[in-house]
Image (cartoon, rainbow, N blue to C red):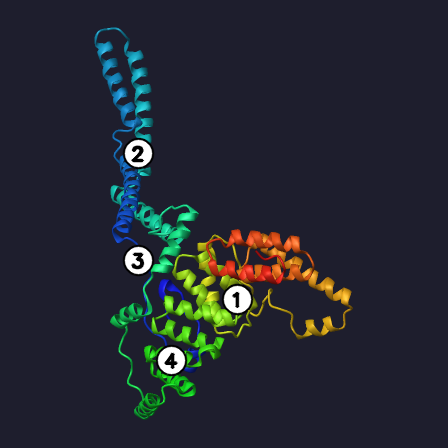
Amino acid sequence: MAAMDGQRVAPAAVSARTGGRRSGVFPLPRNDYVTLMMFWILIFALALAAAALLALALLRRRDAGPGRAEFDIAVYRDQLAAVDSDLARGVITEDAAARTRTEISRRILDADRQRDADAASSAPRRATLIVAALSAAALAGGSLALYARLGAPGYGDLPLKTRIERAEEMRTSRPGQAEAEAQLAKIQPPQPEPDPQFAELVQRLRDTIESRPDDPRGLELLANNEAALGNYAAAHAAQERRIAVLADKATADDWATLADLLVIAAGGYVSPEAERALAETLRRDPQNGPARYYFGLMRAQTGRPDLAFRVWRQLLEESVPEAPWVIPIREQIGDMALRAGVDYEPPADGASPLRGPNADDVAAASDMTPEERMEMIQSMVERLSARLAEEGGPPGDWARLITALGVLGDPDRAKAIYAEGLQVFAADAQARDALAAAAERAGVGP
């Protein structure tokens, strides 16, 4: 189940029916390769220069020339020659010359022992060269590996506003569905031959639909069976036709199925057409799990890991462990949090701290007095408010808080939260619309 930029595609409605078969990878929109290559060449050259300086220091230490002991021995030998000269000229006596020679010889022996010790402590030239080479490789390779892990290759040091603008430009100018499928077809391996009997049945279904093009049930069967054959382009074409026939009667599940087929057909890439299907799904059902996952995936693919993290975090913490999108989110949310600059530890398997009340909670609430229930609601609202203030959260959480404050009769606070949310999601038109709708329900709308 591959997706571009390393993101996995969660199994949703259609993949469950087709055994989860997915293939191919659609690449991310590429940066300027010339600039990227120049950047890597530059940092590699700098790393090599630093490694060369380190190697030069090691070699210079090995080839530093005569040491202090060598110099001392040369001086002492000159002194011995001077003693012999002084004795020949009658400047000193024989006894004095003998004592002086003895002292100088002792010093020569001490210097010679020091010279041997220095030679023993010096590494052989071959070992020095090996250490220098290993140090250079560790410095250059380690620097590049560290940057590749913690840095953002190909991404300039840009102000936040500029990065948001570029991400939005990437989102609006990214390839469409047809281009994505065409690129995928170039690298996708051949599909295995289907079972002949099944292929014959699907062909009969196609012939039937040609004579009954406006049959919603027939189109649904055709979309499902084309997907089972791996003909995802034909599958999403049938699903699009079905939605057109249903018109206003098309449900959130219908649109979610279309989005799923579009993403699979593009090898995990969320195209503008798939984004529109996701928007229609969430407009009808804001809590639709597959649509929320794919919407976060789209944000990750278009340079907004911060928005992807918000969407995935809320979805993960609200979902049951068996939900098909939980495993892909768990595998990716750590990297997404790192890219978003957030220190985040996902809840343990089975834990869901932000999930709504369970059956036991509802049963307990039914036994409360109105005052106790109101106190419980206020406590939940305060916890939500504290979490948003400390950690942030997706637009849905902000909208729920605004609505809850309106219900609790605190319009001033609801209005303040609404104003703050507009600033937080200034670059997300869909989020602003959700906040505006919540503000209207709370009676503090624009």
Q: Which quadrant, please, contains the N terminus?
A: bottom left
Q: Residues within 10 Å of mark 4 (few under 14, many from 20)?
A: some
First of labels 2, 4 by sequence position: 2
Alpha carbon distance from label 3 to label 4: 33 Å
Residue type highlighted by circle 3: Arg
First of labels 3, 1 by sequence position: 3
Mark 4 sits on what residue?
Answer: 241
Q: Nearer the viewer, mark 3 or mark 4?
A: 4
Residue type highlighted by circle 2: Asp
Q: Secondary structure at mark 4?
A: helix
Q: Residues within 10 Å of mark 1 (few under 14, many from 20)?
A: many
Looking at the image, which residue is at 30% across and 36% down? 57
Judged left or right of residue 198, residue 285 is right
Mark 2 sits on what residue?
Answer: 116
Residue type highlighted by circle 4: Arg
Judged left or right of residue 65, residue 282 is right
First of labels 2, 1 by sequence position: 2
First of labels 1, 4 by sequence position: 4
Q: Residue most toward the top?
A: 90
